[in-house]
Amino acid sequence: MTRRIWTDKPLEGRRVVLGVTGSISCYKAADAASKLTQAGALVDVILTESAQMFVTPLTFRALTQRPVFTDMYDPQSPFAEEHIALARAADAMLIAPASATTIARLAHGMADDMVALTYLATTAPVIVAPAMDAQMWAHAAVVANVATIRERGATIVGPAEGRLASGHVGLGRLVETETLVGAVRAAIGVSGDLAGRHIVVSAGGTHEPLDPVRYLGNRSSGKMGVAIAEAARDRGARVTLVCGPIALPTPYGIDRIDVKTTADMGDAVRFVTEGCDALIMAAAPADFRPASTSDQKIKRTGEGLTMDLIPNADIIASATGSFVKVGFAAETQHVREHATEKIAKKGLDFIVANDVTAPSAGFAHDTNQVTIIDEGGRTEDLPLMSKYEVGHRILDRVAAIIATR
Ligand code: PMT
């Protein structure tokens, strides 16, 4: 079996069939087609007749630079039986927006348009993203049809709550493009090398309250941890993200637990690592907390303020279990020495050393430059790369260690 090299572009060269059905939200499908194409996927778009009332084949042709399919019986088609050819070639099929009519077609095995027909003919993972009026979504017929296709293996994404075409607010909006792209990535990753594994990742700094309005904290944005979580999801893992207070959205398909303090993060990590395969601590938990927290806002007196700090427990050092333990070391000097000391001190399989003073690396950047040091002291210097790609280089090692246990 050839080992896959995971890069910045998990969708590169992957075939995605995008079925677009009649809804005002067809414009979002155009955005999804564009984003999937920019991510390197080869996107074959099928438009139903109703979809063509809202958007034209030309829109998708321009965005994907590929032929767009509208007709099952097109004599000009490059394929002898295009529905079968598309269905067989697909790595994933995304139906977005999926109207109530299309969902009924899928549930009842009808093959009277090219979207439904391709759905029936494919063995690739199928993602269905419904969009319709809230009352329609709640109707027993739609509920039953959705349950049927879910039971048969389709992943249902959304709908989201918000303003609908009718002007009412309710459940029925097509989810946003990031969610659609995330769902495609997760579906394609189902057979990755971390399939069936549970990876716990921590992200962000923690906040230690001084009083009701102030806290001790640090500059971790959570980007490194979130990027690792996305990379693990893209390789098929079930991922739990334990986050300090961060301003990033949760990527599709990842379970997230939000915490504030290091003690809370410790409790959450202890709880979710039960039976997991790996813990990757990319978070920057505060090492100290105030010995006491004031119930009221501490007032300015014109004098200085002295505060006692006490140490927090070390989360990863006290983590018990046979899972792989990966630590990070955010250092400003003697990076390798300090990082190496932490491997034994914290009982790690390996550590990711981070010179947080290096340009474009460390806190809040989208890129990072790290050195990976293992238990035996062997080091690997990685060049500056996206945090997502750093995630893959870490997961390459995690997957290899898991395979030996
Ligand atoms: O979030 P970003 O803005 O993307 O920035 C990423 C990052 C710089 C925060 C990240 O790459 C990083 O280096 N995280 C580790 C930060 C840190 O706390 O380093 P440390 O050397 O103090 O801790 C060593 C290890 O012990 C870390 O894995 C840490 O998560 C863990 N730790 C620390 C303290 C504590 N009480 N419990 C712990 O488990």
Image: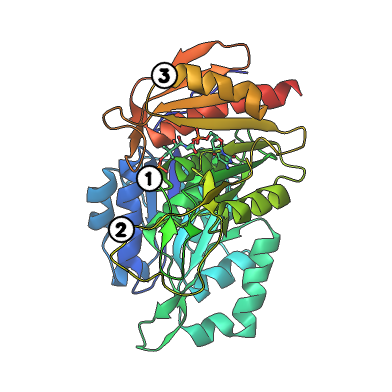
Distance of label 2 from label 1 (alpha carbons): 11 Å
Say which element carries label 1: strand
Disc 1: residue Cβ within 8 A of ligand 1's nearest atom = no
Residue 43: give its label: 1
Of mark 3 and mark 2, the one earlier in the sequence is 2
Q: In 3D space, how far apart are the residues under numbered discs 3 and 2 (Cα atoms)?
A: 50 Å
Q: Nearer the viewer, mark 3 or mark 2?
A: 3
- Specify the amino acid type for callout 3: His
At x 53%, y 52%, the residue is: 289
Relative to 116, say whether 370 is above or below.
above
Closer to the chain start, of discs 1 and 3, is 1
Q: Is residue 382 left or right of residue 392?
A: left
- Tell me: residue 171, above or below residue 291: below
Disc number placed over residue 166 in the picture, else none: none
Q: Position of residue 109 (x, y in %)?
A: 63, 63
The amino acid beneath tag 2 is Ala
Q: Quadrant of the C terminus?
A: top right
